[in-house]
Amino acid sequence: MAPLTVFLIAVLYLQTTVSYGKIVNPCDVASVMLNLGQKKAAVSKWVCLAKFASGFNTQALSKPYPDGSHDFGLFQINDKYCRLGSADSCGVSCTDLVSDDITKSAKCALKIFQKEGFKLWPTWRDNCQAIDTSRFIVKCSLRAPSRGRLWLYHSVSSEEKGENN
């Protein structure tokens, strides 16, 4: 692992142990996902993932995996998706994934989802797949963006991804 990567991980780890980061509201997560083109049914699934993956903590950082990798941010995205030069990269830096502005994390998560579905996240399988996730957004006042907005992402149905829930 390059010295710069080790340094970045160490700095991020210290930040998350000293500072807990911003704990976002579930409705904020829902609103961002809705604005990125997700339908309400899909939005609740993303809110569930954020709840169980990071506890809604924007600066969450996992313990290192045996291969030395880490998961970053609200959706606990593995560093292979934010590593410079990685074929799987979302085009964001790992520090972008632990920002209090969750838009870049959400966009990256959606790119991963378009390729992999929710199966990439064990947290999803263990906590969200078999439940009605709509309960996570019942208190949110969600409105779809204005009609003239261009959608950067579309909601991919469970059937398209081969998932049951």
Image (tube, rainbow, N blue to C red):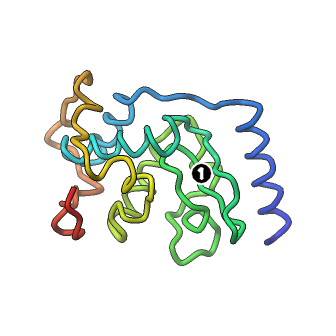
Residue 46 lies, in percent from the top left, at 34, 45
Looking at the rendering, which quadrant does residue 16 occupy? Answer: top right
Q: Is residue 49 left or right of residue 13?
A: left
**Quadrant location of the N terminus?**
bottom right
For the point 32% across and 43% down, the residue is 33
For the point 44% across and 59% down, the residue is 121
Q: Amino acid at mark 1?
A: Phe
Which secondary structure lies at badge 1? strand
Q: Is residue 48 left or right of residue 57?
A: left
Residue 134 lies, in percent from the top left, at 22, 36
Mark 1 sits on what residue?
72
Q: Is residue 83 left or right of residue 91?
A: right
For the point 29% across and 55% down, the residue is 152
Name the foreground residue: 20 vs 150. 20
**Mark 1 Cα shell of 10 Å, populated few (<14), some (14-19), many (≥20):** many
Looking at the rendering, which quadrant does residue 3 occupy? Answer: bottom right
